[in-house]
Image: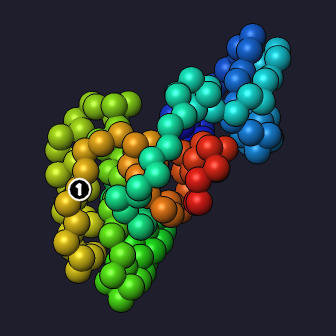
Amino acid sequence: YQFSFFKKKINKAKLYCDYLFLIHKRDENYLIKNKIVEPKKIYICGSIKNNERKSFFINKKKYDILYISQGSLFIPDKRYSSNEKYIVKLIDEYARINNCKFNIALKYYRQDKEKHHKDKIKKEIEFYEKLIKSKIKYSYRDSLELANSSELVITLSSSFAIELISRKHKV
């Protein structure tokens, strides 16, 4: 979820619910401060999706660095895109200089992004191809599988990063 977009979509309508399950306290502060929702009971329980997924570790890592795509080319605020361009170029340069295997977990390959995802995957790959000089064979594996196959995971802002930290990954 993206609360900043969520707030715009509800057009200041007051939302009520019996139970609200959130990843962390910061989410609660945002929702209550901005009067977006009035729940009867709030539970800070971490990522339910992460808690449901089975943990597994791969001893032999396929990638030195994995970047978690933000899909910023589709976000109206251009600050996201410029930040992502900067960090991806930096990772690419580091990987080339240090002979590291580098990959990108595509945002629009995720199953929860299936609506219009084929077109967005193509545009997302084109976005990264313009930024990097390394030859990357994009993997269409699940992001968790890619993270488990990587020594280090880098992201700008992602709830997935929080999930990986809870699984003892280097993020």
Relative horizontal placement of residue 139, taking residue 70 as reference (left or right): left
Label 1 Cα crowd, 10 Å radius (few <14 / some 14-19 / many 20+): few
| Left or right: 128, with 67 as reference point | left
- Residue 66 location, x and y as percent? 41, 61
Note whether 160 is above or below 45 in the view shown. Answer: below
Left or right of 29, for residue 157: left
Looking at the image, which residue sits at the far front? 59
Nearer-the-camera pick, 122 or 106 = 106
| Whole-percent x, y for residue 50 in the image | 57, 32
Residue at point 32%, 51% (across, down): 106
Q: Nearer the viewer, residue 33 or 116?
A: 116
Residue type beneath disc 1 = Tyr
Residue at (40, 43) in percent of width and height: 145
Q: Which residue is mark 1?
A: 138
Q: Nearer the viewer, residue 73 or 97?
A: 97
Q: Residue at x 59, y 60 (%)?
A: 170
- The answer, for residue 163, to whether it is visible in the render is yes
The relative height of residue 119 versus residue 9 in the rendered view (above or below) is below
Disc 1 on helix, strand or loop? loop
Q: Residue furthest top?
A: 18
Image vertical order of residue 96 relative to residue 117, above or below: below
Total marks in image: 1
Quarter-of-image position of residue 133: bottom left
Does the rendering let one see residue 89?
A: no
Q: Residue at x 66, y 44 (%)?
A: 166
Residue 118 x/y as whole percent: 18, 40
Location of residue 1 with respect to 101 vertically, above or below: above
